[in-house]
Image (spheres, rainbow, N blue to C red):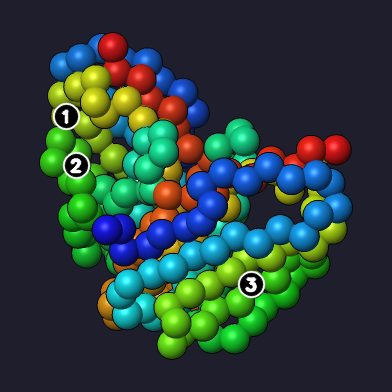
Amino acid sequence: KNEVEQSPQNLTAQEGEFITINCSYSVGISALHWLQQHPGGGIVSLFMLSSGKKKHGRLIATINIQEKHSSLHITASHPRDSAVYICAVGVDSNYQLIWGAGTKLIIKP
Amino acid sequence: DADVTQTPRNRITKTGKRIMLECSQTKGHDRMYWYRQDPGLGLRLIYYSFDVKDINKGEISDGYSVSRQAQAKFSLSLESAIPNQTALYFCATSDFAGASGYTFGSGTRLTVV
C-alpha cells in the first residue's frame, strides 16, 4: 500500500463544475503539499498545509490531521485548470517528501 | 529568467554514455533536489543536498551521482546510461523545511536508446 494515495486517478468534468481531489496518507507528517503539473511538464507549488484550510483564487485546500486526509477543491472550473494535481507529504525533520501518483484533471468547455 | 533552470531540456543519448544534467537556481535556497518522474508514478527522489557540503542519497540513487558546485548549482550525472533511466528529471529547491513551498525547474526529458 502506498503511503500517499490520491483519488480519483483521472477526472473529466465540464467547465463550471466544482472539483474535488482527495489525498490520504498513512504516515505522520510535518506538512502536506499540493502541486500542479501542467501538460507541458512544469510543476508549480499550490499550497502547503499543516492544519485547517487555505484558499487562493478558485482553489481551496483543506487538511484533517486526525483523519490523515486532505482535499483540493476547484470552484467554477475552467479548461485552463486541466493538469495533473499532485499531493505530497513532508515527513521527518529533514523534510523529505513522499509523493502521490497524481490526479489527471480534464475540464471540457 | 526562471528561478530554477535546468539544462538540457531534452536529450537523447546512447546506452553506456555518461551524461550530466545541470541545475541552477536564483532563489537563494540552501536545499536542492533531483527527482525522476516515470509515467503513472509519483516523483521519486534521486539525491538531495541541504547545503554545499551535505549531499544525501534518495530512494533511487543507484546509477546516479551528483555534485553541488555552489549553493546555486546542483548537477546530476548518469555514469553509464541505460534504457530504464529514460524518464523526466526535475530539479527542485526549497528553503528550510519547505515553508515557502518547492520551486521546480522545467524538467529534462532524457531518452536512453
**Vertical order, A27 against A21 (above or below):** below
Structural crowding at the residue carrying mark 2, measured as other residues with C-alpha within 10 Å and reported as few (<14), some (14–19) or many (≥20) = some
- Tell me where residue B88 appears, x and y as whole percent: 41, 34
Cβ–Cβ below 8 Å for labels 1 and 2? yes
**Vertical order, A89 against B104 (above or below):** below
Cβ–Cβ below 8 Å for labels 2 and 3? no
Closest to the observer: B73 or B34? Answer: B34
Structural crowding at the residue carrying mark 1, measured as other residues with C-alpha within 10 Å and reported as few (<14), some (14–19) or many (≥20) = some
- Spatial separation of the CA atoms under disc 1 and disc 2: 7 Å
- Spatial separation of the CA atoms under disc 2 and disc 3: 36 Å
Looking at the rendered image, the quarter that the C terminus of chain B falls into is top left
Q: Circle 1 sits in a helix, a strand or a loop, which is it? A: loop
Disc 2 chain ID: B
Q: Nearer the viewer, mark 2 or mark 3?
A: 3
- Spatial separation of the CA atoms under disc 1 and disc 3: 41 Å
According to the picture, the residue beneath numbered tag 3 turns out to be: A61
- Tell me where residue A82 appears, x and y as whole percent: 70, 43
At x 32% / y 72%, what residue is drawn?
A26
At x 63% / y 46%, what residue is drawn?
A11
Question: Is any part of residue B105 visible from this angle?
Answer: yes
Q: How many marks?
A: 3
Give the amino acid type for the residue marked by disc 3 in the picture.
Ala
Closest to the observer: B73 or B14? Answer: B14
**Vertical order, B22 against B58 (above or below):** above
At x 38% / y 69%, what residue is drawn?
A25
According to the picture, the residue beneath numbered tag 1 turns out to be: B79
According to the picture, the residue beneath numbered tag 2 turns out to be: B65
